[in-house]
Image (cartoon, rainbow, N blue to C red):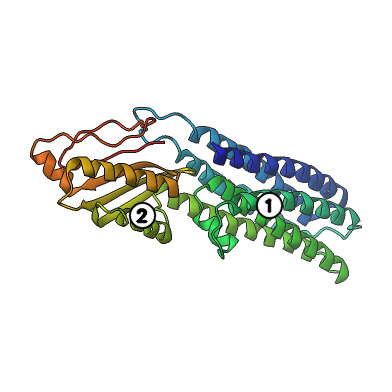
Amino acid sequence: MKARDGTRRVIYVAIAGDVAVAMAKFLVAAMTGSSAMLTEGIHSLVDTGNDFLLLIGVRRGQRAVDEWHAFGYGKATYVWSLVVALSVFSIGGGVSVYEGVLSLMHTPPLSDPTWNYVVLVVAAVFQGWSWRVSQQEIDHHRRPGESLWRTSQRGMDVLVYTVFVEDSAALVGITLAALGIWLSHVLGKPWLDPAASVAIGLVLIASAALLAHKSVSLLLGASLDSDQIAVLRRIISADAAVEGVGRLLTMRLGPDSVLLTAAVRFRRQFTLDQVEQAIERLEHAIKLQYPSIHHLYLESGVLKQAARAGATVPPAATPHDSTPQATAQPAVVAPSQP
């Protein structure tokens, strides 16, 4: 729940900043006729709408498990982040490029840019604040020596990642808008202002591509990274009852939920009771290292042999286990839930 609270905080801060900045940009664009400023206003307005879509994703992703969705609704957040990516691409990037091209065809005369600079400074402050909040949330999962970008790519919370990318694009857009306005006045070339609009639109399209790539990857069942899988393999192999670890598969089910299945070969001299105790130890050790692993399934050849012999092996489930209880079958599992 703490992770979800952090996600909400990031989104609420982003909404507050985007609303304030959008109003200021549109007001100054109307006063000065700046194409770059109008484009930036559209950008902030689109970001505001997208932030509300992300809140819908948070709510949808928290729905309770039911018979049709045994692993929960966590992937709903990936769906809504993909919707946001499409919005950034079409409305944000597309409209910005279109507005810039129109202004290039009919370049407006230059006017006093003072208010443009004032609102851009204000926008930079608000967007920088929002970016900092999302960056701090990402930093909670940062490994020693790891870059911020690498951490954001590895992270499971696509909603925080979306806000981070949007705010990063906004800060780049503000820089381009300021540069376009300044150069158009310094060089006396009005077309540089709408050219900045086109550049801002291209930045938005690039950010939309990043968001879409991340969302689609998670929707298709992205696993934990190789370092995390290596740690899981070491944890399982370290148990005295384990002789070897075969296939180990993971899948991200939401911002704070992971599925883990592992083929574990227990030592033959161990009894079924000892194997069950080993499974309980493994569950505890894995959950201690990775609390986000809410669904844990261990497949054992020893237990399969017991199943063929007619023995019933109850799974080692935690008190809050919502996964159906199972007896030993040709493929025996030990489910674990938070």
The answer to whether 43 appears left or right of 214 in the picture is right
Q: Earlier in the sequence, mark 2 or mark 1?
A: 1
Residue 281 visible in the shown view: yes
Between 333 and 39, the one lying in front of the other is: 333
Residue 94 x %, y %: 62, 53
Asked where in the image residue 200 lies, by quadrant, the reply is bottom right
Residue 311 x %, y %: 12, 35
Which amino acid lies under the numbered mark 1 shown in the image of this protein?
Answer: Trp
Q: Quadrant of the C terminus?
A: top left
Number of residues whose C-alpha sits closer than 10 Å to that of mark 1, classed few (under 14), some (14–19) or many (20 or more): many
Which amino acid lies under the numbered mark 2 shown in the image of this protein?
Answer: Ile
The answer to whether 120 appears left or right of 222 in the picture is right
**Are the residues tagged 2 and 1 within 8 Å (C-beta)?**
no
Q: Residue at x 53, y 37 (%)?
A: 57
The answer to whether 139 appears left or right of 108 in the picture is left
Query: Which mark is drawn over residue 131?
Result: 1
Give the labeled residue for mark 2.
Answer: 235
Q: Residue at x 73, y 40 (%)?
A: 16
Asked where in the image residue 313 lies, by quadrant, the reply is top left
- Between disc 2 and disc 1, the foreground one is 2
Between 84 and 332, the one lying in front of the other is: 332
Q: Residue at x 87, y 53 (%)?
A: 118
Q: Quadrant of the N terminus?
A: top right
Between 271 and 123, the one lying in front of the other is: 271
Q: Residue at x 73, y 50 (%)?
A: 129
Q: Helix, strand, or loop for circle 2?
A: helix
The answer to whether 83 appears left or right of 277 in the picture is right
The extreme bottom residue here reads 187
Q: Helix, strand, or loop for circle 1?
A: helix
Between 83 and 124, the one lying in front of the other is: 124
